[in-house]
Amino acid sequence: MGDKVKTQRTRELEFGGPLGALLLPVLLPCTVLHLLLACRSEEASLFSLPSPLPSLADLWVPGSLLLLLAWCGLQAALYLLPLGQVTEGMPLRDGTRLSYRVNGFQAFAITSVLVVAGVASGVLRLSAVYDVCVDLAVAAVILSFVLALLLYARSLCVPESALAPGGNSGNPVYDFFIGHELNPRIGSFDLKYFCELRPGLMGWEAVLTTMDIVNDGFGFMLAFGDLAWVPFTYSLQAHFLVGHPQELAPATAAGIILLNALGYFIFRSANSQKNTFRRNSNDPKVAALETIPTATGRQLLVSGWWGLVRHPNYLGDLIMALAWSLPCGSAHVLPYFYVIYFTVLLIHREARDEHQCRRKYGSAWNEYCKRVPYRIFPYVY
Ligand code: NDP
C-alpha cells in the first residue's frame, strides 16, 4: 500500500474502550470454558457453575495444542495449494486491491476425504474430538493470545498506511484487542482471511465484501473469535445433545429443517446479491435493482433483499441460529445461548455498521433509512 495514504488516529472507541479491551480477553475465554463444562454436566445450567470444576492440570494438555497446530498446519497447506480461482478484494484506501485465492471448497473436500479415510482405516475415532474438546478449547485460547500478541508486535513495524482505521487509537491495549494492522500478510498468505475461513469455520463465501475483511484490523477480537469462540460455542448444541439426547417427532424435525433451509436461502441470497453488486453493479443479476446514488460515487441497493430490511443477511443468519438450537428441546436455556448471544451481537454489529455507513454516505444513507425503515426484522425492528 502506498505510504502516502496515512491512517488517521481512531477517535471513536468501541466495546467500552481500553477498559473493555482489558476485560473482554479475560471474560470471553472464561465464557467459552463455562459453556463447554456446563454442557457436559448433568444440570446443563447456563447460570450456575458446573461442579466439580476441573483442575488447571486437567485443562492444560500439551498434546491438544499439538493437535490444534497440526490441524491449522494442514489447513494452511491446503490454503497454499494452487487450486481454485484467484480473485481481487475490495479497493484499499490507496485504490489498490489485494488478491485472494478462493479454494475453501477444495480444502473442505480434501479434509473430508482424509477424515473418512482415517475413520474407515481405524486411525481416527471421531468421538475422540468430543473427549478432548475442553482441552482443545484451552489450546485454542492460548493460540489466539499468542497470535494476537505476534500480530500486534508486527503491526508496530509496518507503514502507517497498512493500519486499520478502527484500530489506530495509540492505546496499545485497545489496538491489540481491536486489531492494529488491516491485512497482515506473509508473502501472499493473508493471515486474517485464512483464520476467518479455515481453522474454525469453512465454506463461507462472499466474505471479501464483509466488515471483517474490509474494515476490521486483525487483532485479538478476530483471532479469538475465529480460533476459539466460533468453533467451540457455535457447536454447543451438538455438544449438549451428546449428554442430553432428545426425541424429535418427524414433523418437528421436518419443520426445523425447513426453517434452516429458509434461513440459509435468505442469508445466502442477500450476501450474494450485495457481493455481486459491489463487485460489478452492471452484472445482469443485479442491474435491474433500484439504487440510491451517494456522494462517494458508490450506490446503495434499495430494492431486492436490501430493500426488505437494512440487514437481510443478519435475518437469514438468525433464522439459521434458531433452527440449530431447536433440536435441543425446551427444557434448557443453555443450548439457546448461541441464538441469544447472536441476536445481541448482530444488533450491536448493525448499529456499528449503521454508524460507519452514515459517516460514509451522509444524506444518501438517511434517504436509504427512510426508504427501508426496518433494520433486521421486517415490521418489528
Ligand atoms: P455486511 O456484509 O452486511 O456488510 C455491511 C456493508 O455492506 C456496509 O458497511 C456497506 O458497505 C454495505 N451495504 C450496506 N447496505 C447496503 C446497501 N443497501 N447496498 C449496498 N451495499 C450496502 O456486514 P457483515 O460483515 O457484518 O456481515 C456479513 C455476513 O456475516 C452476514 O451474513 C452476517 O450475518 C455474518 N456474520 C456472522 C457472524 C458470526 O459470528 N456467525 C459475525 C458477523 C457477521 P459498503 O457500502 O462500503 O460496501
Image (cartoon, rainbow, N blue to C red):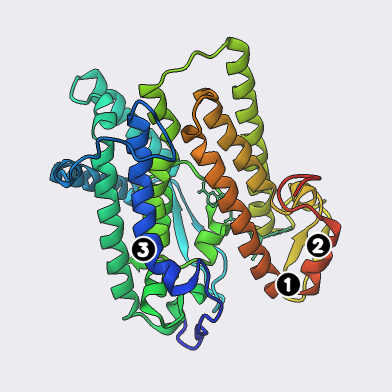
Across and down, in percent, residue 303 comes to 81, 51
Q: Does residue 131 sit above or below 177 in this rendering?
A: above
Viewed as shown, does residue 299 lie left or right of 10? Answer: right
Q: Which residue is denoted by mark 1 in the rendering?
A: 361
In the picture as drawn, the residue positioned furthest to the top comes out as 250
Mark 3 vs ligand 1: CB under 8 Å? no
Q: Which is nearer the N-term, disc 3 or disc 1?
A: 3
Q: Which corner quadrant of the figure contains ligand 1?
A: bottom right
Q: Circle 2 sits in a helix, a strand or a loop, which is it?
A: helix
Look at 29% across and 30% down and name the residue there.
130
The image shows residue 12, relative to residue 324, as above or below, that is: below
x 22%, y 26%: residue: 124
Q: Are marks 1 and 2 in contact (CB under 8 Å)?
A: yes
Q: CA distance from mark 1 to mark 2?
A: 10 Å
Q: Secondary structure at mark 3?
A: loop
Nearer to me, 91 or 139: 139
Which residue does the image show at 53% across and 57% down from the upper left? 208
SS for dot 1:
helix
Mark 2 lies within 8 Å of ligand 1 (Cβ measured): yes
Number of numbered discs on residues? 3
Q: In terms of image quadrants, where is residue 47?
A: top left
Q: Residue at x 36, y 78 (%)?
A: 172
First-in-chain label (3 vs 2): 3
| Label 1: how many Cα within 10 Å (few below 14, some 14–19, many 20+) | many
| Viewer-nearest of discs 3 and 1 | 1
| Residue 296 shown left or right of residue 334 in the figure | right
* Residue position for label 2: 368
Whether the residue carrying mark 1 lies under 8 Å from ligand 1 is answered with yes
What is the C-alpha distance between the residues marked 3 and 2? 38 Å
Q: Dot 3 corresponds to which residue?
A: 188
